[in-house]
Amino acid sequence: MSTGVAGLAIALARRGPCTGTPRGACDNGGMARLAADTAAAHARGAVSPYLLLALTPFLWACNWIIGRGLHHDIPPMGMTFFRWFFAVLILAPFAVPHLRRDWKIVKANARTMLCLGAIGIGTHNALAYLGLNFTTATNGLILNSFIPVMIVTFAWIFLKERLKAVQIGGVAISLAGVVAILSQGSLAVLAGFRFNAGDLFVILSMAMWSVYTIALRWRPSGLHPLSFLFAISVIGDLCVLPMWLGEMALGHFIVWTPAGVAALVSVALFSSVLAYIFWNRGVELVGAQVAGLFVHLMPVYGVMLAWIFLDETLGLHHVAGIALILAGIAITSRGGRLGASAAVRR
């Protein structure tokens, strides 16, 4: 599976900026043509944005499990710094040639790039790993499920954007599915959920990710996907560097093991490079509000992986929850299919 996912990312990256996306979607005047032109792109063999957005939460769910499992050996700032350090090394051979050609665009949009890198790479990841030092991976996955609600709320407050009634219904149905899975169908279990300091850091991390997702609409036009990801990765990692140095000054050092290095490289490749390429492209095509709903797939993947690999029981509440989540995603996606005002603006 990993080979197929990597191949998909390479094919997607080679398409270049806005390839398979109508020209009007990359300027300020073409939203009305977005749906028809994207359908034509699919006819030409373009990768479905919904496939990309469905794969991304799986890669991130694995990251949360790994991050929690390594928190004793790798402190949060060290985890964040080396995750993106390895990601930069992986990206460099493919991205640097594009970045040389795109450097004028990057330089002209320095403020936008700095903000996206600092928020979407540095702050978001650092807060998430910090939270995993004090809370469980399960709690982290639960709290991730509120990202779609945050995106919708932030878009409404700051950008005056609203979902259609059918999309709001889809978000509610999907969120009900998350609650069904995590509560095990029991109100007592749901009432027993307790917040701790780690949960607060995770919530702040989710807020940063929601802001990043909405702000992708201001990604510079004409910038190759690999140039963009490489640039914000370097920026984000540089933002984390002083935090990692401060962490070491406080006596928190990485315990290097072969398993730890392998895990970091895996997270860098799959949860960083590939997941960000998929997510950025998906948001570009369907908009932040629709894309955000796919985060609800994270607990679905967690349940299915536990059933397949850990021999855990698949209960009726799991089946009901998964059905509700998929139904909510389908309703919201169709309600805002590629024509919503949340689509990327250039």
Image: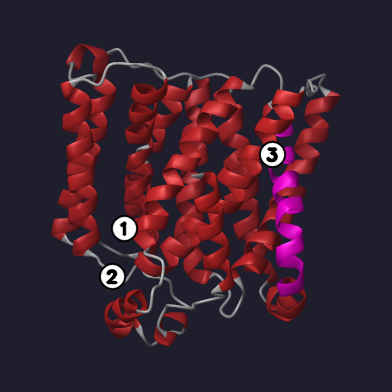
Q: In the image, residue 104 lies at what x, y percent?
A: 74, 80
Which residue sits furthest right? 249
Disc 3 to disc 2, C-alpha distance: 37 Å
- Binning the other alpha carbons within 10 Å of mark 1 as few (below 14), some (14 to 19) or many (20 upward) gives many
Between label 3 and label 1, give the one nearer the viewer.
3
In the rendered image, which residue does mark 1 sit on? 290
Q: Quadrant of residue 57?
A: top left
Query: Residue 192 or 22: which is nearer the viewer?
Result: 22
Label 3 sits on what residue type? Val
On the picture, is 186 further left or further right than 267?
left
Q: At numbered mark 3, what does the secondary structure look like: helix, strand or loop? A: helix
Find out whether residue 344 is within the magenta segment.
no
- Binning the other alpha carbons within 10 Å of mark 2 as few (below 14), some (14 to 19) or many (20 upward) gives many
In the rendered image, which residue does mark 2 sit on? 340
Dot 3 and dot 1 residues touching (CB under 8 Å): no
On the picture, is 254 further left or further right than 287?
right
Count of numbered circles in the view: 3
Q: Is residue 267 above or below residue 159?
A: above
Magenta stretch mostly in which secondary structure? Answer: helix
Query: Residue 96 or 144: which is nearer the viewer?
Result: 96
Q: At numbered mark 1, what does the secondary structure look like: helix, strand or loop? A: helix
Label 1 sits on what residue type? Val
Dot 3 and dot 2 residues touching (CB under 8 Å): no
**Which residue is depicted at the point 45% across and 50% down?**
210
The answer to whether residue 180 is seen in the rendering is no
In the rendered image, which residue does mark 3 sit on? 265
Disc 3 to disc 1, C-alpha distance: 30 Å
Residues rendered magenta in the picture: 77-98
**Which residue is depicted at the point 78% across and 28% down?**
247
Label 2 sits on what residue type? Ala
